[in-house]
Amino acid sequence: MESFPCNIATKVLERLASRAHKEIHWSKDVKGELNKFHETLLTITKVLQYAEENHMANPLLLADCFRKLQDVCYDMDDVLDEYEYKNLRMQVLKPKGSMKEKVHNLFSIANSVMSSYKMGHRIKNMRKRLGEIAAQNLSSICPNELQICMACTRRGRPALSWTPQM
């Protein structure tokens, strides 16, 4: 039985991997944060589905973890919608005729750069929330069957990985 929060997570994962999102010109920070968010969400979703399918977890604890995951996924969906809106708006505002319109569009482009910077921080905060969900819940949901390890990446940030124990 596929649970509702996993469906939401799957929807967000599909949007992150979609061709449209790959073609959008994200700033370097936003691209990196989106990739990290995608990897973390994918890992957590796999762990929760594994736990649910094998009836390994306390149902109340699993439901709480699903609720937290659902909140983060809805927030990420909102961020993606907002960015798509801003991208479409920039396409409509492409420089046209008069100097006034070109100056207006120049400031709109500058605002979009600042918007990408802010969006990178929003995504980073959501990724931290996912990390907190993983740290607080996953080890107690599947303590023996899953090995959750925090390993240092190149930049000294923790990375989440898992392997089911057979």
Image: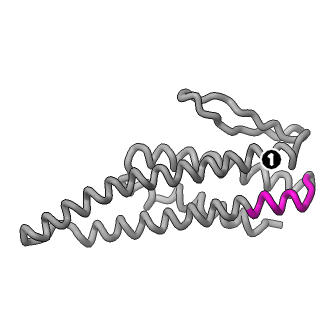
- What amino acid is found at the position of numbered circle 1 in the picture? Leu
Report the residue at 7% width, 67% height from top.
99
Q: Pinpoint residue 153: horizontal percent, then vertical percent.
A: 59, 29
Report the residue at 91% width, 39% height from top.
144
Q: Is residue 105 left or right of residue 71?
A: left
Q: Pinpoint residue 161: horizontal percent, then vertical percent.
A: 71, 38
- Is 48 rendered above or below residue 80? above
Q: Pinpoint residue 30: horizontal percent, then vertical percent.
A: 44, 49
Q: Pinpoint residue 46: horizontal percent, then vertical percent.
A: 74, 51
Does the magenta run of residues contain 129?
no
User: Magenta segment, which residues?
Assistant: 57-67
Q: Is residue 53 left or right of residue 148?
A: right
Report the residue at 13% width, 65% height from top.
102
> Callout 1: helix, strand or loop?
helix
Q: Is residue 154 left or right of residue 94?
A: right
Image quadrant of residue 75? bottom right
Q: Residue under label 1, please give it.
A: 138
